[in-house]
Amino acid sequence: MSNTNPPPTTTFQAFPKDKQDALARAQAEKLKSVAHLPKKVNIPGIPNVPMMTPVEDHGPMVQQQPQQRPGLNVYTPQVDQQANAQASALFAQARQQQQPYAAPIPEPMHQVPNAQVGFTNAIADAESMSLALPSRFAFYGFKDFYARPFVTKHIAKLQKAHREQSLLPIVEAVSSVCFTTDPAYQGHPIAFDLSLPDFFFVLYWLRMNSFTKSNYVHTTKCDNEVHLKRVENGLNRAQFEAQVKANEMTVEDFDALMANALPESSLNISQIVTQTDLRVNELETVPDPDVYHFSETSSMYFRPPTVRDVIEFAESPQMADDEQRQEFAFLAQLATHIQHRDTRLSLDERVEIVGNAEPDYIALIKGFEKAIKGYGVVEKIKVQCKECGASRETKLSIAAHSFFPAQ
């Protein structure tokens, strides 16, 4: 069957006169906007022409009469002189209104040392213990932190957290057993203002000191390649049967594959946690505050997201709106890294600030976020597959509402 579709063609038509005039005005404005930059003069027949020197900006550019070189004719395009004057005035006004960028865009890991905090104030409390937070208190107004184990009256909130899968009851329970000696934070629910790595560090301490006789079950999946292949064979049984019918596979080979196949459920590993490898990575360096800031006079400062930020984010009405969720999540993730020095701004207020910020500031927040990663508690456990015997080390990741055993 022959192809009756005509071959593609391209035709050109001249713009109408009003469009040509508009293009000419736009070209003139473009030439005016870059006229102060050095340019290389390219004149046919005259080699090695030096670079032109920059012209000092004295406001709106004045139309210059072209200078004639001996033996050369200079071509001057015909443009709208009134449009040129208006464009020059607009560009001059824009240059006067431009504000220089307050802080340089930092290198990805521009950091300074973060010194360990020493002894501050003594307490007279037989139950509480001083905890050295992984952040070394780098982003807090207080410089000491104390905690005491849970008692029976806290179990109700822990059960509520399990039942509702909510973070708020856990934070309230943790705040009731934690404090600092700093007078500015007396009676303050201090756990809400901890960074997430510090908060999980406190959860680990409370788990080990409050529930000494409880076990945890860690669930993961086997990733042994041979085991995965045997499961894949079982899932592809219908495909192999079709190959047997098409004489592409022998019955003997099919029976051998199915005899060795395993169900997908055989990949599941459930193991009681009796001993783990617990490691605490401290924040030995912090992002340089001389680099990571908005301006010298700004009251906003950079810091890691806090537990309060996470709760505000999870309970925000925008997260329940399908049309707003994606945009809000992007802005909120950035906004959790900034806060006001004197007044605690809500997450919505900081989202508004970030939403109206220049792109350079967004890059600054992203750089800060990257520079503070890596500190906190890392818990690993060695698991073994009961089906194939393969063992490996896996990282534990426990949700806060499931961190403590259900009673």
Image (cartoon, rainbow, N blue to C red):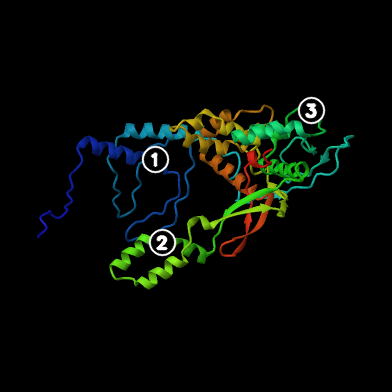
* Residue at point 55%, 59% (across, down): 222
Amino acid type for the residue under numbered disc 1: Lys
Q: In this view, does 153 lie to the left or right of 402?
A: right
Q: Give the quadrant of residue 20.
A: top left
Front tag of 1 and 2: 1
In the rendered image, which residue does mark 2 sit on? 48
Secondary structure under the numbered disc 3 in the rendered image: loop
Q: In this view, does 13 lie to the left or right of 192?
A: left
Task: Estimate the x, y position of residue 264 in percent, counting from the top left.
Answer: 48, 56
Instruction: Give residue 186's mark.
Output: 3
- As measured in the structure, the alpha-carbon distance from the residue carrying label 3 to the one carrying label 2 is 76 Å
Q: Do the residues labelled 1 and 2 touch (CB within 8 Å)?
A: no
* Residue at point 45%, 47% (across, down): 37
Secondary structure under the numbered disc 1 in the rendered image: helix
Front tag of 3 and 1: 3
Task: Estimate the x, y position of residue 282 in percent, counting from the top left.
Answer: 73, 50
Q: Give the quadrant of residue 340.
A: top right
Secondary structure under the numbered disc 2 in the rendered image: loop
Q: Quadrant of the N terminus?
A: bottom left
Task: Estimate the x, y position of residue 132 in percent, counting from the top left.
Answer: 78, 44
Tell me which label, 3 or 2, sits earlier in the chain: 2
Instruction: Give residue 32's mark.
Output: 1
- Of the pair 104 and 276, the residue shown nearer to us: 276
Amino acid type for the residue under numbered disc 2: Asn
Q: Residues within 10 Å of mark 3 (few under 14, many from 20)?
A: few
- As measured in the structure, the alpha-carbon distance from the residue carrying label 3 to the one carrying label 1 is 63 Å
